[in-house]
Image (cartoon, rainbow, N blue to C red):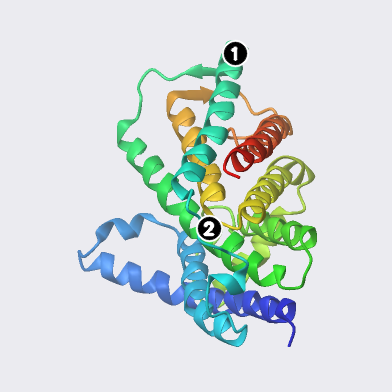
Amino acid sequence: MKDVAKLALYFIFVVIVGALFAPFLFWSAQSVAVHGVLSFLARYDFETFFHRALLIAAALLLWPFLRISQVRGMSDLALAPNRRWDRDLCAGAFLSVIPLLCCGALLIAFHVYSFRHVFAWSRFGKVLAASIAVPFIEEWFFRGIVLGVLLRTGRKYMPILAVSALFAAVHFLKAPEQTTAVVTWSSGLNSIAHSLGRVGDPMMVASAFVTLFVIGCILGDARVLTRSLWLSIGLHAGWIFGSGTFSLLAHQKALALPWLGKNLLVGIIPLGVATFTCVVMRIWLKYDRASKV
């Protein structure tokens, strides 16, 4: 069986297993919360547990997928040791966070955003944690494993485009909050239907999906150019940290879709900023690698 078919079956099983497991996960959490253990779990709706169930299914099914795909090490995923990993990591973070925050400063100057009266320090810890954890998890999965498997087809750009589309789509695989009032065994499957229904919104596609797709292409390009994940992890971390921190510093006066969405990572303006980062990243790589020859 070809790698593409194996990958497609893997994601189909992830969605099915995750959807069927989500109600059990939700009921278990609610039962634990009722008995006074981890009572904070009672605050989360079913859609939150549905998303977590998909992540658990992806993790559980990953090892069998790697086995049948005969992935034994990094070399099988077109990855190589990177002696400049710290340099690439820091450069990626710098190249993504600085243009993003400069864009935010301009938006404040043009009164699209305004400073908040109080900085939410309690939420800053969550932003920092997400900036560290999310890039490692998503880059290893999407750019490390999924893209690595597809690159074995001998092509370069089609795998990057395919993984970027998947990367963008996964971020919308969650129904709106409070969609499921009564949880049954079929609630997970219903959440998938509600998630797919959001794709029919042309304004959402023009703003959020396209921006995430282009960001995915940039991350994939960084991974292929360096045969390493460190630059893409740095870029990803910088975007999450910059957008999250700016949201704590300033609030948006009004949505301006498709130009600007709910944060600095959604809309045509963030798309332009990401494209600028891509150009600067390629220029930096060209001269950085040339200087080490």
For residue 185, above or below residue 247: below
For residue 48, above or below residue 154: above
Residue shown at the point (35%, 74%) measured from the top left: 28
Residue shown at the point (76%, 73%) measured from the top left: 153
Which residue is at the front of the view, 260 or 193? 260
Q: Amino acid at mark 2?
A: Glu
Residue shown at the point (44%, 46%) measured from the top left: 86
Question: In x, y percent, where is residue 206?
Answer: 77, 42
Question: In x, y percent, where is residue 269?
Answer: 70, 29
Mark 1 vs mark 2, CA separation in Å: 34 Å
Considering every residue shown, the one lying at the far left of the view is 36
Q: Which residue is mark 1?
A: 111
Question: In x, y percent, where is residue 192?
Answer: 63, 67
Residue shown at the point (57%, 43%) measured from the top left: 292
Asked if marks 1 and 2 touch (Cβ < 8 Å), the reply is: no
Which residue is at the front of the view, 184 or 247? 247
**Which of the labelled discs sits on residue 138, or is there none?**
2
Image quadrant in which the N terminus is located: bottom right
**In this rendering, would 36 be left or right of 203?**
left
For residue 236, above or below residue 155: above
**In this rendering, would 112 be left or right of 178?**
right
Q: Quadrant of residue 126?
A: top left
Which residue is at the front of the view, 193 or 59? 59
The answer to whether residue 185 of the structure is visible from this angle is: no
Question: For mark 1, does the 10 Å Cα neighbourhood hold few (<14), some (14 to 19), or many (20 or more) residues?
Answer: few
